[in-house]
Amino acid sequence: MATITHNAPAYGSATELNATQSLAALIGRVLIVLLYIPSGWGKLVGFSGTVGYIASKGVPLPEVCAAIAVAAELGLGLLILVGWQTRWAALGLAIFTAVITPIFHNYWAAPEAMVMMQKLNFWKNLSIVGGLLMVFASGAGAYSVDGRSTRR
């Protein structure tokens, strides 16, 4: 039986990623948080509307849930954007998205006219969870606060 060992840095560390990969990681981080940061900001400035919408879905403690949504979308989104604690922020946002998706995009219980839209949003969100898990697995790249701290 062969044993594979290596002393290379973990995939995604600033020393292993080349410039093209780090640029792709930066662009990927920017694109994925384009969904979350404006949404979190909108929830913050329209907090009462957010609470009302969450309550309309039958979610308990809608004020607390709205605050969690703002913290996750805006807070974790900004962390991913600048690339600080990126892996943990991406994992947190992936968990948040996985939890809220069946609540807010429950296509199986939607009126017939809305089934297709809700189904598309449901599967889109699960795809985004996959992208966030890739960020969790690979890190932020060199063009990030995390990348700067590993280069010193």
Image (tube, helix red, strand yellow):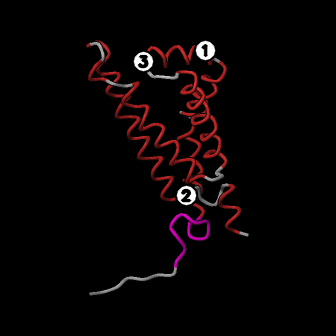
Note whether 130 is above or below 47 in the view shown.
below
Q: In this view, does 55 lie to the left or right of 113?
A: right
| Residue bearing mark 1 | 48
Mark sitting on residue 148? none
Amino acid residing under circle 2: Gly
Relative horizontal placement of residue 108, taking residue 44 as reference (left or right) = left
Q: Position of residue 8 (x, y in %)?
A: 52, 77
Residue found at x 52% / y 70%: 10
- Say which amino acid is labelled 3: Lys
Tag 1: amino acid: Ser
| Residue where numbered disc 3 is placed | 57
Q: Compare residues 19 and 133 and report the one nearer the observer.
A: 133
Q: Magenta segment: does it hold 13?
A: yes
Secondary structure of the residue carrying tag 3 is: loop
Alpha-carbon span between mark 1 and mark 2: 35 Å
Q: In which quarter of the image is the N terminus?
A: bottom left
Q: What stretch is highlighted in magenta?
A: 8-18
Q: What residue appears at the point 56 percent right and 18 percent down from the top-left corner? A: 50
What is the magenta segment's predominant secondary structure? loop
Q: Quadrant of the C terminus?
A: bottom right
